[in-house]
Amino acid sequence: MGSTLPLYLQATRNENELSGVSNIPNLSRRSFLRGSLGITRSAIALATLSFGNLVLGGCMFAREIPDKETALSAILEELEKRYGEKFHQLDSKDIKSFTYEQPRNGVQYIATLAPDTSPEKIFSGSIDTDAHTHKQWGNILDNYQQHIFDPIVCTPFREYLHTVEGIDGYSVQLSWNKMDSKVWKKEQVEEYMGKGAQGDPEIFIVIMIAEDSVEAMAQTVYEVQKGLWPLKRNMHVLAAISGLSFDCGTIYNTPVDKENLITRGNPPEYEEIKESIGNYQFRNKQMKPERWDGSGEAGDPNDSDVAITWLHKPQK
């Protein structure tokens, strides 16, 4: 059984927060890097968990979930009822379990799933239980809805990046997806995306650029962000050196105060970006270079590294 993970590493928001149930997803290299750099939403998650538990309490079910196998069976059964189709667990992914002590002692099981008819639409399903009685606590949650909304909200970003000059490659994904029990429809896209506040879903963008002078790389990042700004979504841009992993090749992350649509104002200034890149380069020089070809990993796109679409393949 996995150990408790700190709330600052959480990557999704979920309805059980309002019933006092935490949500602890898988972590990609990308999400861990963002967490380690403080680019997270820990304060709001912690406050929501604590307040929700005190005010609303939670819903305890009679069903007992003593182990991973029972958890998976319960999740698959509920999702078939919810969506009217069958799902399966990915063979390459184990069911993960995490313990937590706040707002109550519990165990969360997370399964990586896909519909039988569309195995490429990978997502997560979770169930929470009381650590002592093993009874289900809160609703079974999923983020299957990301595959409805990703093509709608991410396509304009992909279209822009595919034509922009100065980058070698890119990836775009919908992140901070809701973990809930609601069956969403594509017509509800604006309701799902919210008003652009902290905690609403956001577009996570990776741009890979050739190593150059700080000034040249800063200009590229500046132009990319300025071009994406009119698309009016919560968004985060991570820039990295082509051919290197995020751990040692990241040179820029959008500042926290520029991520949310309703508070961000104008795009980051060139001088601000240049200073950030200089700081990252100083850090990167202390690390051993690690090559990365831009390949993705099989998993929930919300918490996994998505493959880079290369416009210009980096030199090996």
Image: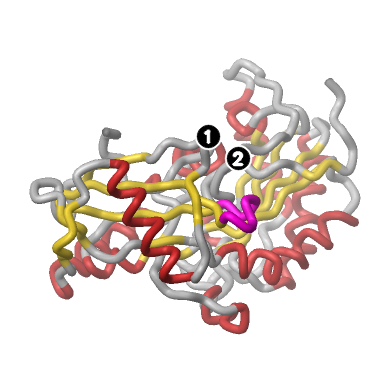
Q: Which residues are magenta?
A: 116-122
Q: Residue 280, how many percent across, how many down?
A: 62, 34
Instruction: Tell me: 225 left or right of 301.
Output: right
Q: Amino acid at mark 1?
A: Ser
Q: Are marks 1 and 2 in contact (CB under 8 Å)?
A: yes
Identified at 36% across, 54% down, the residue is 126
> Marks 1 and 2, how far apart in space?
8 Å
- Residue corresponding to mark 2: 298
Identified at 9% across, 50% down, the residue is 133
Q: Which residue sits furthest bottom?
A: 187
Identified at 36% across, 56% down, the residue is 75
Q: Residue 6, how many percent across, how many down?
A: 31, 43
- Residue corresponding to mark 1: 92
- Name the foreground residue: 124 vs 29: 124
Instruction: Indicate whether residue 121 is drawn in magenta.
Output: yes
Q: Amino acid at mark 2?
A: Ala
Instruction: Tell me: 78 left or right of 237.
Output: left
The dominant secondary structure in magenta is loop
Q: Which residue sits furthest left?
A: 132
Residue 2: quarter of image:
top left
Disc assigned to residue 107 = none
Instruction: Indicate whether residue 300 is drawn in magenta.
Output: no
Quarter of the figure with the N terminus: top left
Q: Is residue 33 visible?
A: no
Instruction: Tell me: 222 left or right of 145.
Output: right
Instruction: Tell me: 309 left or right of 286.
Output: right
**Mark 1: few, some, or many residues within 10 Å (few <14, many ≥20)?**
few
In terms of secondary structure, where does tag 1 sit? Answer: loop
- Name the foreground residue: 118 vs 102: 118
Residue 152: quarter of image:
bottom right
Q: Is residue 22 depicted above or below 188 in this figure?
A: above
